[in-house]
Amino acid sequence: MSKLRLGPIPEEKPVKLSIELQGALMRDLQDYCAVHAKMTGLGAALPPERLIPPMIERFISGDREFSKQRRRS
């Protein structure tokens, strides 16, 4: 079985942010939460708001052009 890009979610003090998601994206996110829980051995799925920050962090850290431009500035 292949691994998800998102691993265990660390506990950190959150900062509030409000966003709007399209219905289809929210359903996909909820499905991802369920799969993530199954693949990481959690008893229950984490709420989407716990997964969004690590997803964004993973996306940013994997963006090579962003990293290159950030180093230049």
Image: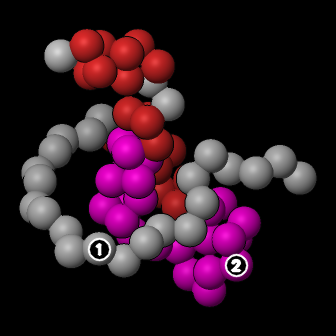
Label 2 Cα crowd, 10 Å radius (few <14 / some 14-19 / many 20+): few
Q: Determine if the magenta segment contains residue 40.
A: yes
Label 1 Cα crowd, 10 Å radius (few <14 / some 14-19 / many 20+): few
* Image mark count: 2
Q: Quadrant of residue 66?
A: top left
Q: Circle 2 sits in a helix, a strand or a loop, which is it?
A: loop
The residue most toward the bottom is 43
Horizontal arrangement in the rendering, residue 37 relative to residue 68 (left or right): right
Front residue of 67/29: it is 67
Which mark is drawn over residue 69?
A: none
Give the x, y percent position of residue 11.
36, 77
Q: Which of the two discs, 2 and 1, sits closer to the camera?
A: 1
Give the x, y percent position of residue 53.
33, 53
Residue 66 shows up from this direction: no
The residue most toward the front is 72
Front residue of 60/32: it is 60
Give the x, y percent position of residue 20.
18, 41
Q: Residue at x 47, y 19 (%)?
A: 64
Q: Residue at x 30, y 35 (%)?
A: 22
Q: Quadrant of residue 63?
A: top left
Horizontal arrangement in the rendering, residue 35 relative to residue 64 (left or right): right
Q: Which residues are magenta?
A: 35-57
Can you identify the residue that label 2 sits on?
A: 41
Q: Determine if the magenta segment contains residue 12.
A: no
The residue most toward the right is 1
Q: Residue at x 60, y 60 (%)?
A: 7
Question: Amino acid type of disc 2?
Answer: Gly
Which mark is drawn over residue 12?
A: 1
Question: Amino acid type of disc 1?
Answer: Glu
Q: Is residue 49 above or below residue 67?
A: below
Scheme of colours in the image: secondary structure
Q: Circle 1 sits in a helix, a strand or a loop, which is it?
A: loop
